[in-house]
Structure formats: C-alpha cells, structure tokens
Amino acid sequence: MSRMLTNQVVAITGAGRGIGLAAARQFAAAGAIVVIGDLDDDVAAKAALAVGGRAVAHVVDVADRESFARFVDLARQQGPIDVLVNNAGIMPLSPLVDETDAATDRIIDVNLRAVITGTKLVAPEMIARGHGHIINIASAVGRIAVANGATYSASKYAVMGFSEAMQSELAPSGVDVSCILPTVVDTELAAGVSAAKGMRAVSPDEVAASIVKVAQKPRFETWVPAWSKGLFYSMNVLPRRVRNGAGHAIGADEALRAVDVDARAEYERRARR
C-alpha cells in the first residue's frame, strides 16, 4: 500500500541543484514539507523559492558533523523528520595516481561519511517513533566500478554496503532504508560524461520520480532507468573476462575516462572547493 506524503517532513541534502532540487519539487507537489539543504546559502534560498509551498532552506556542509546536526535540528522545527534523503555527493574524476589526498578525503567525507552521519542523526528519533525512511542516493557505479573514478566508485560501493546493513538493523524498528542507483544523469555532476553505447543520460526529474515513488512504497534497491538493473544482474553471472569484454564493447570502461575536460572544468573546480 502506498504511503501518503501529505504533511510529511522530508529533509534533502544537496537539494539546491540537480537531482536534489528535482526531488524537492516533486515531494512538495505530493504535499510534503520539504527542507532543502545545500552548501551554498544563496543556492539553497533560491531553490526554496523555486519549490514554493512550505519549502524551507538551510545551509549544510554534510562533511561537517556539527553543520549536519544543525541542519537536522532546524529541519525538526517543521516537525519530526519522516524522510531523510542523503543526496549530497561529489564526483571529481582523475586517475587515482593523480588524485590528491585532500580530494580523496573530500569524496569519502561527502559521499560516504555524510550518509553515515545523517543516519546517526535521524535514526534514534525514527526508532523511537516506530517509523521513518532513509533514502540514500548511490549510483550505478556502486555496483559497477569504472576506471578514472576509483574513489568515487569505492564511496558508492560503501554506501550500498552500509545501506544493506542498516536495512537489516533498522527494519525491526519499522524504519526503512532504500538506495537509488542512477546511471549517467544530466546534471552538472556528470558534465562532460557520456553514457555508454545504447544508453542515454536520464533526467533529474526521472531520478526524482523514483525517489518519491520509493518514499511512497519502500523498496531497498531502485535503478534508474529501471531496465539497467536487469542488465547488471544478467551480466554479473558471466565470467569476469566476458563481462569486461561486453563492457568494453559498449564503452562502459571508458565512461569516466573519455570525458570532455573543458565541459567539466567548472564542476571540478567547485567539487574540490
């Protein structure tokens, strides 16, 4: 049975742009009270105005526990948090040998540690109430590692592992945990990145629709587009040599290596800020 989202408090990190902003719009349209979190206060404020309704915005640096805790406390002013969408993420791309230690730390802090921190901050209250939902935005590369984004892939693999453990840990308390695994999404994060042959970049609205659908009817793992899940699990039963050959044939092994550097320049600068 689908859950009603009317008057539900939904907190979304990284909601000033892209997938997070699209999700904020769709949650608001479904009647939810949306709390937008973003690192840039101006971007967050403009996003809240664009979403309209009862949407509010607060600054949050998800890599800073104190900042994340303040965001959660401010979100609670709207009521108990019913849904936390851990959406904030960064994807600097380079061969690992060229990746600075600072970049490695930032990727892990934003993409993985923040998911753990957010869960720690909201789970106790959800457990006490006997319901709640934590939705983690992972990635197809959380199941399919790709060259030139090794640390990014590692962070998303870890999000999947963490989420699977938390699903088992929180289910007896009535708290749901879900993961969304998009392929290439047409956002600034994927600037200059091309989808594999035979695939297209999905829109933020498509991913957002899956997030809202999962909030209404919880399930653990949702791929966007949906058919990519079947492709992954079908390929995964094949020997590695065959999988590698098939991946090379459609250009999947070059997806994060053959990028348009100029198109990514501004995103890379901001991601490493």
Image: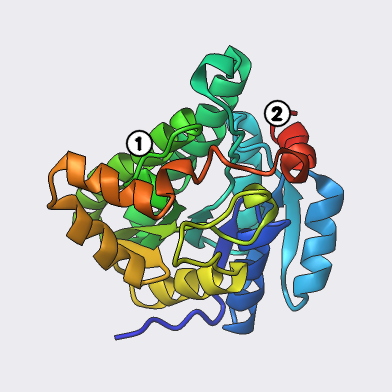
Residue at left offset 42%, top offset 70%: 225
Q: Name the residue nearer the viewer: 16 or 241.
A: 241
**In whole angstroms, how far apart are the C-alphas of marks 2 and 1?**
21 Å
**Amino acid on which disc 2 is placed:** Arg
Q: Name the residue nearer the viewer: 161 or 94.
A: 94
Label 2 with label 1: CB-CB less than 8 Å: no
- Give the label on residue 272, or none: 2
Q: Secondary structure at mark 2?
A: loop
Image quadrant holding the C terminus, namely top right
Q: Secondary structure at mark 1?
A: helix
Indicate the position of residue 53 as horizontal and vertical percent values: 74, 78
Indicate the position of residue 70 as horizontal and vertical percent values: 65, 40
- Give the label on residue 269, or none: none
Residue at left offset 47%, top offset 68%: 211
Q: Name the residue nearer the viewer: 251 or 83.
A: 251
Task: Give the mark nearest the N terminus, 2 or 1.
Answer: 1
At label 2, counting other C-alpha atoms closer than 10 Å, the crowd grade (few under 14, some 14-19, many 20 or more) is: some
Indicate the position of residue 176 as horizontal and vertical percent values: 31, 60
| Residue 123 visible in the picture | no
Q: Name the residue nearer the viewer: 244 or 158.
A: 244
At label 1, counting other C-alpha atoms closer than 10 Å, the crowd grade (few under 14, some 14-19, many 20 or more) is: some
Question: Quadrant of the rendered structure where residue 12 is?
Answer: bottom right
Q: Which residue is mark 1?
A: 158
Residue at left offset 46%, top offset 28%: 151
| Residue 214 visible in the picture | yes
Instruction: Determine whether, in the image, residue 178 is placed left or right of residue 194.
Output: left
